Image (cartoon, rainbow, N blue to C red):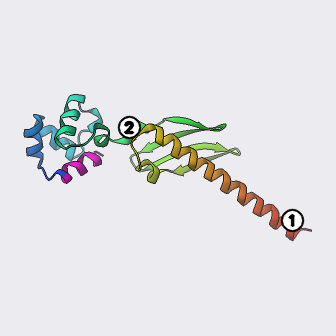
Amino acid sequence: MNDAFKKHLVKSGMTMYQLSAKTGIPYTTINKLIHDRLDINKVSVEAIYKISVVLETSIPDLLNHIAIMNNASGHCGKIKYKWVCEETKPPYIVFLYNGMTVEIDMEDDFNKSNERKYYDYFAQIAIERYINRAKFEESIKEDLNAAILP
């Protein structure tokens, strides 16, 4: 939890005490964020803004993306999908295809951008790739069956 925040703090070279002094946010709050006893997404907007200014980054770059995308849904053609983000595994999308529940790991795409519109784009590409691969595998099976059973 709070990995993005921690990464930006380390990158800045500041200590927790220095961040506290520069932002006016209590040291105990910064300490709780660093030790995952407080979710950064539950900190006040004012505090997040102060941290983003001092660490010279954007507010979305500090937030935990899991809370932002969990249960977000969309469509790829006639297929409806849903993002699932759990603390124990990488983000993935879930959808039904030919009566089967399909899960696709989206960790690489999830980390490419923090803009919601791109998540939909990445999900659609993953679904289309899955469908094309499934159709290709089915056609190979049909060709093999036709060759074996004349």
Q: Position of residue 133 (x, y in %)?
A: 66, 57
Residue with the mark numbered 1: 146
Q: Does the magenta stretch include residue 93?
A: no
Q: Mark 2 or mark 1, which is nearer the start of the sequence?
A: 2
Residue 114, disc: none
Q: Give the range drawn in magenta.
A: 1-11
Residue farthest to the bottom? 148
Look at the image and tell me whether residue 93 can be seen.
no
Q: Is residue 77 shown to the viewer in this render?
A: yes
- Reading the image, the residue beneath label 2 is 67
Helix, strand or loop at mark 2: helix
Q: Are marks 1 and 2 in contact (CB under 8 Å)?
A: no
Q: 20 or 52, which is in the foreground?
A: 52
Residue at the (71%, 46%) spot, across then down: 98
Which amino acid type corresponds to the residue marked 2 in the rendered image? Ala
How packed is label 1: few (under 14 Cα within 10 Å), some, or many (20 or more)? Answer: few
Q: Residue furthest right?
A: 150
Which residue appears at 16% of the width and 37% of the height? Answer: 29
| Image coordinates for residue 140, horizontal then vertical, percent | 76, 63
Q: Quadrant of residue 80?
A: top right
